[in-house]
Image (tube, helix red, strand yellow):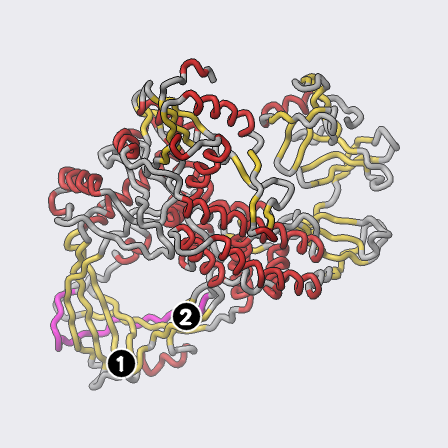
Amino acid sequence: MATNNIKGKKLVIVESPTKQRTISKILGSDYLVRSSFGHVRDLPSHDMGVDIAHGFKPTYQPVERAKKLIKELEAAAKNASEIYLATDPDREGEAIAWHLVELLKLPKDRYQRIYFHEITPAAIKESFAHARKIDENLVNAQQARRILDRIVGYKLSPLLWKKITSGLSAGRVQSVAVRLLTERAKEIKEFQEQPYWTLKAQFEKAGAQPLFWARLLKWDGKNVEQTKTYHLFAEDYKVKNTVFDKPETLAPVSTLLRQGPCTVAKIEKKEVKQKPKPPFITSSMQQDAYNKLGFPSQKTMMTAQHLYEGIEIAGQTVGLITYMRTDSFNVSKLLQEQTHKFIAEKYGAAYAPAHAPVYKSKVKGAQEAHESIHPTDVRRTPQSIKQYLTADQYKLYELIWLRFVASQMADAVFNTVTVDITAGTNEKCVMRAGGRTVKFPGYLSVYKDEDDNENEETALLPELAEGDALTLKEIATKDHKTTPPPYYNEASLIKTLEKHGIGRPSTYAPTIKTILDRKYIARQPKSNKLVATELGMTVTESLKDFFKEIMDLSYTAGVEEKLDEVAEGGQKWVDLLNEFYGPFQKELEEADKGMRRPEAKQTDEKCPVCGKPMLLKTSRFGQYLVCSDAPNCKGKINLGKEGEKIMPEKTDEICDKCGSPMVIRTGRRGKFLACSAYPKCKNTYSIDAEGHKVASAGPIVTNRVCDKCGKKLVLRSSKRGYFLGCSGYPKCRNIVTVSDEEVTQIKAAAQPQEKA
């Protein structure tokens, strides 16, 4: 970064390179816009970094990628006439701005904090008029969350290693999310389905069409439909059935209907209005993107980030949507006025309500100062910019645009009619038919949900009047079974987390990704249902017995509310941590004494080495079978996702170290060639897609040299993937990132050789 071009300019620091490019074009040559590339400082990666005894004092360190960057930003800040910190408009963004102030050693009179909910010229220029200093309450709330989660992770993880298996980890919000799935699996397993029967009848009015169906509503003075409520771990689940639990119990109903007379007893007609749903917030966007587009939450947030930060449209970089981490339904008055005019022009004056709709947030702890997720300019229709967007960007932008426009439109209006029919001379049997027709579509002409489509399924009724005689044409009975609560998918899990106030908008997608990566839950291939794994269930059962508060929904939600109080200045962050840590420390001590390692389950499988029974065990990599005589016998069989055995595949290869046959085995990183004499011989090789030997499974020496010490770089792998590391390790710890294409080229060029 050349400092001679900086002097006298106004420095604006954002946290994203894409935002840097977009905002640079908006602000022009008087401003120098630079990116922090996300977080610049954090707690240390290999140490808790929190001094609990001295008021939970954190020790922050610059993140690795920021070390060089900070020097460049220091030079820019030194020569700039003014400094503006323009990180995201949430607690995390406020914390990043604070860390920048600390690292760059900026005195209060040298910087201003600005923020905006959309990246448009008007919003950015307006933000300078409302510049302020760092909000320490927001920073403290973010600090408290980070420290709280660090303490839970660093204290619980070693306990799980000791009591269950090595490599496990736990988190405050993640553990509760896993418990939701674990409890749901138990509820489904324990659910006892019950049969029930329903009845409907088809009637005709003489000289009138059409024929129509009515369902049985009451029998012998009682409503026949029942809704039984099950009080489950996360929410009340309602199971619908009827009082008729056997087919023969419907016989008296059929007899009475056939005997008649069947008469129209009551008709009720009314006009019903249906309001549109509010504009998207983070959770509802993730749910709709999953249900309508099939996008996982992580993909939704990544795509929304691109739309927010700016897309090249006809030579101009434009931020298309507002900030995508929000729990507020607010819309600016200016945009509401623009949208009202747009709706009137495009759809007609009747579709534009006289007063802009107001939506009150039902989300616990919603930040009402924020904006909802909506287009920055409603006139920028999805079709008009389709050519500039990727397929995913277009789909998500269209979804956001349609939802927002619909939220600002007039209500849909329906004409409804309800008809009650009696059989016999009294009201022992009451049937009901209903019809609904659209009087005015309103917002439904733009945006519909599945429940809107269901509501449109209406019965067509002839002209009827009270006292009309009807002729019975047909009786139909149907058997049903009560159904258990469904498995969660990403949309329903996020909905439940939001409903109970667990986590905040920025945490939903990372939480799901984390527990998937840890293999505490799994996504079923075809249905995309989320199910708790055996490992997830084991960890949950172990934790909930000793850490009742951490694993409790209401407690976790209560912590979020206290963090909100810190953000608003009503609670001291150190006091919050003190309230948490005392009871937590006692629970840790009790768990260390009382938690027992789960016993391995004995199976009917025989050890392939010694023939003794094998035990089923679970690790962070999944389930596997191990010989009951371990460690004396090394017999082991890996299991696939569905519990199937993964047995070594025979090959024609001969081990060049001991002469034994080579077999193809499956490990954490895929298939590889291994000596069948393992563990006596541990010779291994990588294989290509066709199963051919390509190189040693250990580090591959490349022709590239280390730019720090001059020694050759070798291809190594970790749980995060492949990288190039210096062969002079540990004296030289230089590493270089490498693309998937480069990895393929290195492997293809490598020859079998000794491990580096």
| Secondary structure beneath label 1 | strand
Residue at which label 2 appears:
479
Q: What is the x, y in percent for residue 25?
A: 33, 22
The amino acid sitting under disc 1 is Cys
Mark-to-mark CA distance, 1 and 2: 20 Å
Crowd rating for badge 2 (residues with CA inside 10 Å; few <14, some 14–19, many 20+): few
Q: Quadrant of residue 375?
A: top left
Is residue 587 in view from this perspective?
Answer: yes
Point out the stretch of residues depicted in magenta.
462-483
Is residue 382 in view from this perspective?
Answer: no
Q: Which of 640 and 46 is in front in this view?
A: 46
Q: Are marks 1 and 2 in contact (CB under 8 Å)?
A: no
Q: Nearer the viewer, residue 627 or 211?
A: 627
Q: Which residue lies furthest to the top in this view?
A: 4
Q: What is the x, y in percent for residue 687?
A: 70, 30
Q: What is the x, y in percent for residue 99?
A: 48, 37
Q: Is residue 302 left or right of residue 749?
A: left
Q: Which of 574 and 248 is in front in this view?
A: 574
| 592 shown above or below 128 | below
Residue at which label 1 appears:
429
Q: Residue at x 65, y 50 (%)?
A: 168
Q: What is the x, y in percent for residue 36?
A: 47, 30
- Along the polypeptide, which appears first: circle 1 or circle 2? 1
The amino acid sitting under disc 2 is Asp
Q: Which residue is drawn at 77% across and 26% down?
A: 756
Confirm whether the magenta stretch covers residue 205. no
| Secondary structure beneath label 2 | strand
